[in-house]
Image: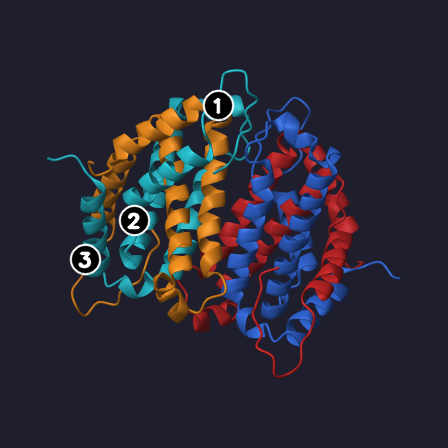
Chain colours: A cyan, B orange, C red, D blue
Amino acid sequence: MTEPDVPGLQRRLADFAAARQWQPYHTPKNLAAALSVEASELLEIFQWLTPEQAERVMEDPDTAHRVGDEVADVLAYLLQFCTVLGVDPLAALAAKIDRNELRFPVRGENDTHRHSSE
Amino acid sequence: MTEPDVPGLQRRLADFAAARQWQPYHTPKNLAAALSVEASELLEIFQWLTPEQAERVMEDPDTAHRVGDEVADVLAYLLQFCTVLGVDPLAALAAKIDRNELRFPVRGENDTHRHSSE
Amino acid sequence: MTEPDVPGLQRRLADFAAARQWQPYHTPKNLAAALSVEASELLEIFQWLTPEQAERVMEDPDTAHRVGDEVADVLAYLLQFCTVLGVDPLAALAAKIDRNELRFPVRGENDTHRHSSE
Amino acid sequence: MTEPDVPGLQRRLADFAAARQWQPYHTPKNLAAALSVEASELLEIFQWLTPEQAERVMEDPDTAHRVGDEVADVLAYLLQFCTVLGVDPLAALAAKIDRNELRFPVRGENDTHRHSSE
């Protein structure tokens, strides 16, 4: 059994949807909505937790399973979205990190850092 | 230059955050919230489009760039979330597809199919 | 029985949370996360529907009930968020409509209109 | 100048959209997506804040204005969604609180309480 990789998972997801004739549902707009819904289901696990409780979610086996399951759902819809629109998600992220290295240069130790979301 | 892969991108993202002392912000709860916010920014591109317009978003270079950029942001926060909590996203998705193959068996040609989100 | 109004619903929600000692959970950040999660649950009802199917969701009693239930959840967290931070939601919306009337003037019949999200 | 109320705001929003010929965009599915996007924009304000920083967002005038603006956007799309589908948001919430009072009875002082999201 080989390690799963992104192109192999994209093929498995495409075959899975095709075998069940789900492609008509998997429009770019629907997949973007589904991705957003699944990301919210992941957030839901954390919504009432203190930061300290949130750090320890993997200690409870049921919650750990739920976290892995929601991660899988988010990744599944992200990859299917990318397949449908012809976006290479790994190349897109590598290019973004390149841009962010220029945009947020590492400054000297005594600088005041300001966190940015991008 | 080698092809980017998920473990390599996770290392680059971790190094990027460490060099800018952003780790205190990158708690599991904050990263789950940021992932959800970025998924909504991807959806925002599609919110007013008809299904037909949504199929053609990559024909416009500016929109295509924006789509790639939001895909990168979603993947970046998903991978950072997984790094912080020790979740293997590719293994989680492979296991989920295995489970779904049992849960949604492919039926005969004449069956009525009902689409399910999971 | 009087008609419910926003200030009355805000009081009922505050009393409900206080009687169950839920206030420690109802921080601004948690309520913003919960609001976002509930808005996604409303979207989930529509994610695989065509625009035409989506127009008819209220014809099915179960779906109609689910829509009303998710609308209630979104409004509940929005009002609780506003109570905790001292925001008047109706005044905020009235002010926003005033601003948008200046920002998006109604143009002549033959102009080309471009829809904006704000 | 009278106080704004929900039915009056719904009329203003409907007139605003009609005058700009935006109704074709305001389908139930699109409005549900837009509501979810705006709720995420509200969450974005809080995503990197500690719980303590989040409690104090209204002390900074710019952030306070941004919070009010996002609250207005969430409420605007929620009300437009309700108008289009014929849902009474205040009645839906009042009915939900009624149901929750039965579902989560207030227990004696020495009971252990468990917070629920609904």
Residue C32, quarter of the rendered image:
top right
Mark 3 → mark 2, Cα distance in angstroms: 21 Å
In the image as oriented, which residue stretches furthest toward the bottom? C110
- The residue carrying mark 2 is A79
User: For mark 3, does the 10 Å Cα neighbourhood hold few (<14), some (14 to 19), or many (20 or more) residues?
Assistant: some
Figure quadrant of the N terminus of chain B: top left
- Amino acid type, residue under disc 3 in the picture: Val
- The residue carrying mark 3 is B106
Q: Where in the figure is residue B115, as x and y percent of width and height?
A: 32, 60
- The structure residue drawn at horizontal position 37% and vertical position 41%, both measured from the top left corner, is A96
Q: Where in the figure is residue C56, as x and y percent of width and height?
A: 49, 72
Residue B18, quarter of the rendered image:
top left
Give the label on residue B22, or none: none
Chain ID at mark 1? A
- The residue carrying mark 1 is A107
For marks 3 and 1, give the one nearer the viewer: 1
Q: Which is nearer the eye, C3 or C48?
A: C48
Chain ID at mark 3? B
* In the image, residue D21 above or below residue D13: below
The answer to whether dots 2 and 1 both sit on one chain is yes
Q: Where in the figure is residue D109, as x and y percent of width and height?
A: 69, 24
- Amino acid type, residue under disc 1 in the picture: Arg
* Residue B67 showing in the rendered view: yes
Q: Which is nearer the eye, C25 or B8?
A: B8
Chain ID at mark 2? A
Q: Where in the figure is residue B103, as x and y percent of width and height?
A: 25, 49
Mark 2 → mark 1, Cα distance in angstroms: 35 Å
Name the secondary structure under disc 3: loop
* In the image, residue D107 above or below residue A27: above
